[in-house]
Image (cartoon, grey):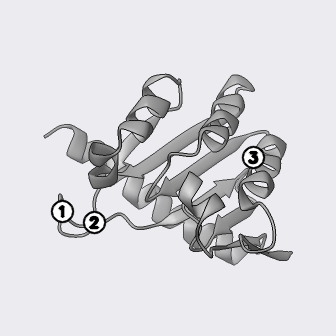
Amino acid sequence: MKEVKFARTESVAEAVICLLRAASHSVDAALYRLNHPALAQALQEAVSRNARVRLLVDGNKYEESRATQALLAGSSIPFRLAFGRRGRGSKMHHKFAILDQRTVLSGSYNWTLESEDENYENLLVLAEPETVAAFAAEFETLWTAAARSEDR
């Protein structure tokens, strides 16, 4: 399965919310930016359904964004801050989510109000096992590295 969404022609946020609501077991997301309240709410709903949710957010953007801090402070979404290959100051620039270990969402789309309302953005929805496995391996590596950086 492959779907392509463009913010120019449809609400990518609505598509992501529908997919998140269909996830029953797990949601792992690595997001450069997150400030879209409805997308954060959909993640919170997944937590409330007892799906395992893990969120990686770029640490630099998190530190800059009061909106992101407020969204995550008011939720029970488990999250860690991640940085790029050179640590603080470099970017964890990913924009992907893995749903139920079966579907990957990836593309230029940041989970932000700006991406929804202002930018030309894209989202690919992929359900190819090899692709899901590659994204899952990347997520696990970053999740583990982010846990180590929390200890510093």
Q: Quadrant of residue 40?
A: top right
Q: Give the residue type that dot 1 points to.
A: Gly
**Dot 1 crowding, Cα within 10 Å, few <14, some 14–19, many 20+:** few
- Which of discs 2 and 1 lies nearer the camera? The answer is 1
Apparent side of residue 122 relative to residue 28 in the rendered image (left or right): right
Q: Residue at x 73, y 50 (%)?
A: 100
x, y percent for residue 125: 75, 69
Q: Quadrant of residue 90?
A: bottom left
Could you tell me if residue 111 is visible in this image?
A: no
Residue pointed to by mark 1: 89
Q: Is residue 22 above or below residue 99?
A: above
In primary-sequence order, the first of circles 2 and 1 is 2
Q: Residue at x 50, y 49 (%)?
A: 34
**Disc 3 secondary structure class:** helix
Residue pointed to by mark 3: 20
Residue pointed to by mark 2: 84
